[in-house]
Amino acid sequence: MAEIAERSVGKASPGKLALLYDGSCPMCTEGINKACRFDNTGNLEPIDLFDPAVRARFPDLKLGNLMKELHAVDDSGRVYRGARAVNEILRRQNGPRSWLAYLWYIPGYAWLADWQYKRIAASRYQWDAVSRL
């Protein structure tokens, strides 16, 4: 969790966390839908990265990087990617739901979460094909 969030020119709406995800990926879309159902703050702002307004709003975020992993951008322009974006979603929850974010402080957990996230993200279209069988 020592990774420092990068900055973006674009920002989420005030008080929100913008979630840029691959809307053409059923697994990604379902993951965002679950995150929004889990959210008890109403502060998540899901944005399909293929929305034409994304390029204008977040011009410095490269499509190739956005395709690799979830990007969460806060209202200050901080960018969290992959498993760290998931951690940021959890961290912003109210009450006991936010406690899940503390898993990232367990030695080795942040590394394991990042490794597993990247492994699944790299094969997400294969997972989708398997789920249709």
Image: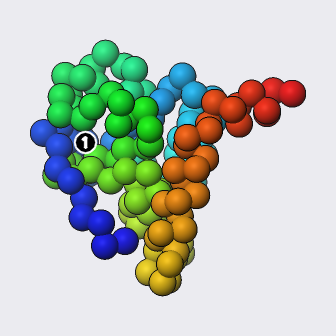
Question: Farthest residue in the bottom direction?
Answer: 107
47 left or right, relative to 114: left
86 left or right, relative to 30: left
- Residue 31 placement (x, y as % from top left): 59, 43
Q: Quadrant of the C terminus?
A: top right
Question: Farthest residue in the right direction?
Answer: 133
- Residue 95 placement (x, y as % from top left): 48, 73
Question: Farthest residue in the top direction?
Answer: 52
Q: Which residue is mark 1?
A: 12
**Which residue lies at the image location 44% right of the left edge and 42% below the top edge?**
69
- Residue 74 placement (x, y as % from top left): 26, 50
Residue 3: quadrant of the picture: bottom left
User: Label 1 sits on what residue type?
Assistant: Ala
Can residue 98 be seen at all in this image of the molecule? no
**Which residue lies at the image location 17% right of the left edge and 43% below the top edge?**
8
Whether 48 is drawn above or below 7: the answer is above
**Which residue lies at the image location 12% right of the left edge and 39% below the top edge?**
9
- Residue 101 placement (x, y as % from top left): 47, 71
104 left or right, relative to 16: right
SS at circle 1: loop
Whether 99 is drawn above or below 24: the answer is below
- Mark 1: few, some, or many residues within 10 Å (few <14, many ≥20)? many
Q: Nearer the viewer, residue 75 or 120?
A: 120
Q: Nearer the viewer, residue 18 or 40?
A: 18
Q: How many marks?
A: 1
Q: Quadrant of the N terminus?
A: bottom left
Q: Nearer the viewer, residue 37 or 82?
A: 82
Way the structure is coloured: rainbow
**Which residue lies at the image location 38% right of the left edge and 27% below the top edge?**
49
